[in-house]
């Protein structure tokens, strides 16, 4: 059997799993995915935790203890999620050590309700880093307007960051600038830049979902010819921006101090449209020094039917720009779409967080000890 996942790794794409649960940890499944499917990292978000905690009884023991202590639902959620991240980080630690901190990383997101509050986001990032207390953690901060200065400040404190919810090329450039600013702050504070790592999570499939919807509404043959092209074009142009920023004199000065490049991470790589090949957002985004975080279904689809044929990004920029220009020419506003997706992304994670609070509160009440 051809090992598409190994070929993907060999091309310089780190394979991370976009999922985590207590069951995945305790059953040995996560360790198995590392061993057999070349998984070298884990990403989480509020939706993933809400699903994990609402399914099965894997959290009952911890919830029973938390209920006995009469903790608040907010504290319970943080104790549960950071416990999972801590345990996953311990499982991933050999990869972290073997790659000198590059991989073996587990991400945990700041409270999404803080997405538009810079100071609160930084405070939350510091608290999460302290709570998890593992060197191979990444704190996820959304790339909102308020998130950009929070990213710079958090990196400047020596905390490694996964920047999430990036949709636009303009915002991605601001993210990279914030990363460099953070490294410069860390250098001023005398911190070891070689210990600071970051990825920038550029969301893929949601771009096609929104633009394809608008293409279908137009209904012309000219429009339909562009279905499924915008997301890949957008991501490829993001990689072009990455190549530009990390070849500047500003970056070179930091690299001489031991700094690590902020890798582009392809997120939301499960296809939403069944008309598309399940591995489309893997096959077409192969480039060195990137991360692809996959839902389990996409991971196994890539293993079975991935078409890994070398670098599929470099040299595509002219066509990618033409594809986005053609979409714009249809009257579909790129700026409008990416802002909508960012707003929706924050709203969805906030809704998941609220659902997580509600379901955890119900579990605490169910497992609360009877008085007496």
Image (spheres, rainbow, N blue to C red):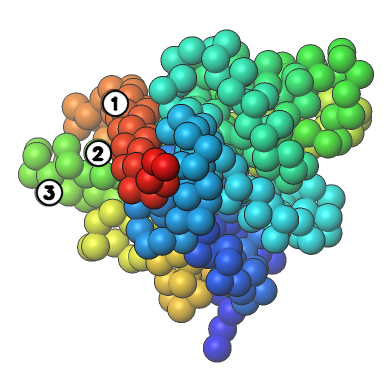
Task: Tell me the quarter of the image containing the N terminus.
Answer: bottom right
Instruction: Please name the residue that numbered disc 3 is placed on.
Output: 221
Q: Is residue 304 above or below residue 62?
A: below
Give the distance between the C-alpha atoms of the residues marked 2 and 3, in whole angstroms. 18 Å
Instruction: Please name the residue that numbered disc 1 is placed on.
Output: 340
x and y percentages locating residue 156 in the rendered image: 75, 19
The secondary element bearing badge 2 is classed as helix
x and y percentages locating residue 173 in the rendered image: 56, 24
Task: Mark 2 vs mark 3: give the one in front.
Answer: 2
Please report whichever mark, 2 or 3, sits nearer to the chain's N-terminal start.
2
Please report whichever mark, 3 or 1, sits nearer to the chain's N-terminal start.
3
Q: Residue furthest bottom?
A: 1
Give the distance between the C-alpha atoms of the residues marked 1 and 2, in whole angstroms. 9 Å
Residue 334 vs residue 202: left or right? left
Q: Residue at x 19, y 27 (%)?
A: 331
Tags 2 and 3 touching, CB below 8 Å: no
The secondary element bearing badge 1 is classed as helix
Instruction: Please name the residue that numbered disc 2 is placed on.
Output: 210
Residue 346 vs residue 304: left or right? left
Task: Mark 3 vs mark 1: give the one in front.
Answer: 1
x and y percentages locating residue 30 in the rendered image: 59, 66
Tags 1 and 2 touching, CB below 8 Å: yes
Q: Residue at x 66, y 59 (%)?
A: 40
Number of other residues with Cα within 10 Å of mark 2, as a class: few under 14, some 14 to 19, many 20 or more: some
Between 147 and 328, the one lying in front of the other is: 147
Please report whichever mark, 1 or 2, sits nearer to the chain's N-terminal start.
2
The secondary element bearing badge 3 is classed as helix
Query: How many marks can you see?
Result: 3
């Amino acid at each position: 059997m051809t090992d598409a996942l190994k070929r993907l790794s060999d091309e310089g794409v780190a394979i991370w799993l976009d999922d985590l649960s207590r069951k995945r940890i305790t059953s040995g499944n996560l360790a198995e995915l590392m061993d057999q499917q070349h998984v070298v990292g884990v990403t989480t978000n509020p939706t993933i935790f809400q699903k994990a905690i609402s399914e099965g009884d894997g959290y009952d023991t911890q919830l029973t203890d938390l209920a006995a202590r009469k903790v608040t639902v907010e504290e319970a959620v943080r104790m549960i999620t950071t416990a999972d991240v801590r345990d996953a980080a311990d499982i991933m630690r050999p990869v972290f050590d073997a790659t000198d901190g590059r991989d073996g990383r587990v991400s945990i997101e700041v409270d999404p309700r803080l997405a538009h509050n810079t100071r609160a986001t930084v405070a939350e990032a510091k608290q999460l880093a302290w709570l998890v207390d593992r060197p191979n953690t990444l704190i996820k901060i959304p790339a909102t307007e308020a998130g950009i200065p929070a990213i710079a400040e958090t990196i400047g404190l020596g905390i490694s960051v996964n920047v999430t919810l990036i949709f636009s090329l303009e915002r991605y450039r601001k993210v990279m600038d914030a990363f460099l600013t953070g490294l410069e702050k860390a250098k001023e504070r005398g911190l070891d830049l070689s210990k600071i790592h970051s990825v920038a999570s550029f969301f893929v499939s949601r771009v096609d979902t929104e633009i394809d919807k608008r293409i279908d509404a137009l209904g012309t043959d000219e429009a339909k010819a562009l279905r499924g092209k915008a997301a890949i074009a957008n991501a490829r142009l993001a990689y072009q921006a990455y190549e530009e920023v990390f070849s500047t004199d500003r970056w070179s000065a930091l690299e001489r101090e031991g700094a690590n490049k902020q890798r582009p991470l392809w997120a939301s790589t499960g296809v939403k449209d069944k008309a598309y090949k399940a591995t489309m957002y893997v096959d077409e985004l192969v480039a060195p020094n990137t991360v692809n975080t996959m839902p389990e279904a996409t991971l196994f689809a890539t293993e079975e039917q991935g078409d890994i044929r070398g670098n599929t990004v470099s040299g595509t920029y002219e066509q990618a720009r033409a594809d986005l220009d053609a979409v714009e020419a249809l009257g579909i506003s790129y700026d409008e779409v990416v802002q909508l997706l960012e707003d929706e992304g924050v709203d969805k994670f906030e809704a998941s967080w609220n659902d997580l609070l509600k379901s955890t509160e119900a579990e605490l009440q169910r497992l609360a000890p009877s008085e007496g």
